[in-house]
Image (cartoon, helix red, strand yellow):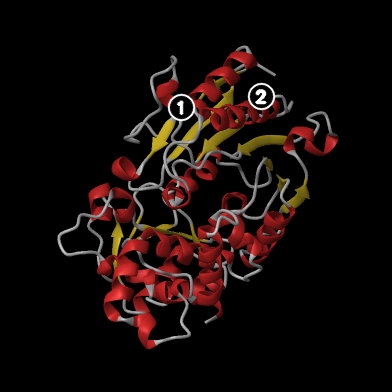
Amino acid sequence: MALYAAAAAVLAGVESGQGSIKGLVYASNFQNVKQLYALVCETRRYSSVLDSVIASAGLLRAEKKLRPHLAKVQRRVSRNEDLLEVGSKPGPASQVPRFVRVNTLKTCLDDTVDYFKRQGFSYQGRAASLEDLRVLKGKHFLLDPLVPELLVFPAHTDLHEHPLYQAGHLILQDKASCLPAMLLAPLPGSHVIDACAAPGNKTSHLAALLKNQGKIFAFDLDAKRLASMATLLARAGVSCCELAEEDFLAVSPSDQRYGRVQYILLDPSCSGSGMLSRQLEEHGAPSKERLRALAGFQQRALCHALTFPSLQRLVYSTCSICQEENEDVVQKALQQSQGAFRLAPVLPSWPHRGLSTFPGAEHCLRAAPETTLTGGFFIAVFERAEGQR
């Protein structure tokens, strides 16, 4: 009941203009912010349908003490696609599967698959194509064809209460969000910087790739998000990460602590225009002024990251679909590096590439519900050019 009450309070706050969904969720002090955020977003997604259902059922007349927002969230919206009118066609975002990364710091793929089998799920093995993921239904699940240890369940599968998730054995993470760490591919024992780290899913993925051997320097300016991240990393069994409440732009590349850093993951603040839930918080495209400000910060952060003396490989990623935050930032950083870095050609079979705004932009990756069955995303992999130091 506490979850529903917290969700109702957030919904009321959003509608009265007290703040955004994300801001009010983090300010709620509810223990499981991800669960609360998911419930609020799903309730908002089907708000008009839920209003109709509540009205037709006479729910508020029958329960005088029930507030409208509480009535909405108590309609068990984890399956609220069943409330849609017959014949309505769900959008691409609603068909994105539930991706679940097996946390290899705590368990292994085989044990996880066996656990789900014992719970009555049917394992179909490794998917052969995106179409296999698109048609998943019921209690069937697959292994993703590209990302190791990434399981795929039907859309709207809710695993927030699952014991493996609660124990940190599973990370609920969109496939596109798994690509940055996978493409950075740090070797065990390496030193890595996660420049804008919170909320921490990518950091935990890096730690799993490192097998907790080496060091991750993780920076973020938001103390509350950093505290939540510390809890997430502890639950995931991460022991190789050093958290710092610090602006990455203030971190000196000449500091001896970072002299061995060969890998940097930079996933800076962005408009979030590719996020599946963003349509619930904002209407329309981000303003030109906001994009200009974000792109300015992103470019400064990227150019700063490229000055670390031992850097060999960097992944720049955003959950934005805007050219200003993606190809434009990458092009300017490449120009400023004066040939020291180039874009690495990665995942040649990936179907959605960067916009053709400059030579080499095809090496960048884009993602979208329509083309990759994921959230909207952008990734560019920088590698130091041979002979450059």
Q: Position of residue 152 (x, y in %)?
A: 36, 59
Nearer-the-camera pick, 7 or 106: 7
Residue at the extreme left of the image, as rendered: 87
Say what amino acid the circle numbered 2 marks. Cys
Q: How far is disc 2 from disc 1 in space, using C-alphas?
A: 18 Å
Label 1 crowd (10 A; few <14 / some 14-19 / many >=20): some
Q: Position of residue 104 (x, y in %)?
A: 54, 61
**Dot 2 alpha-carbon crowd within 10 angstroms: few under 14, some 14 to 19, many 20 or more:** some
Please name the residue that numbered disc 2 is placed on.
Answer: 303
The image shows residue 276, relative to residue 341, as above or below, that is below
Which kind of residue does numbered mark 1 sit on? Gln
210 left or right, relative to 358: right
Q: Is mark 2 on a helix, strand or loop?
A: helix
Q: Which residue is depicted at the point 58% across and 69% down?
A: 32
131 and 300: which one is in front?
300
Q: In which quarter of the image is residue 293?
A: top right
x then y, percent, for residue 373: 33, 48
The residue labelled by disc 1 is 323
The x, y position of residue 214, in whole percent, is 71, 48
From where the camera sits, is residue 385 visible? no
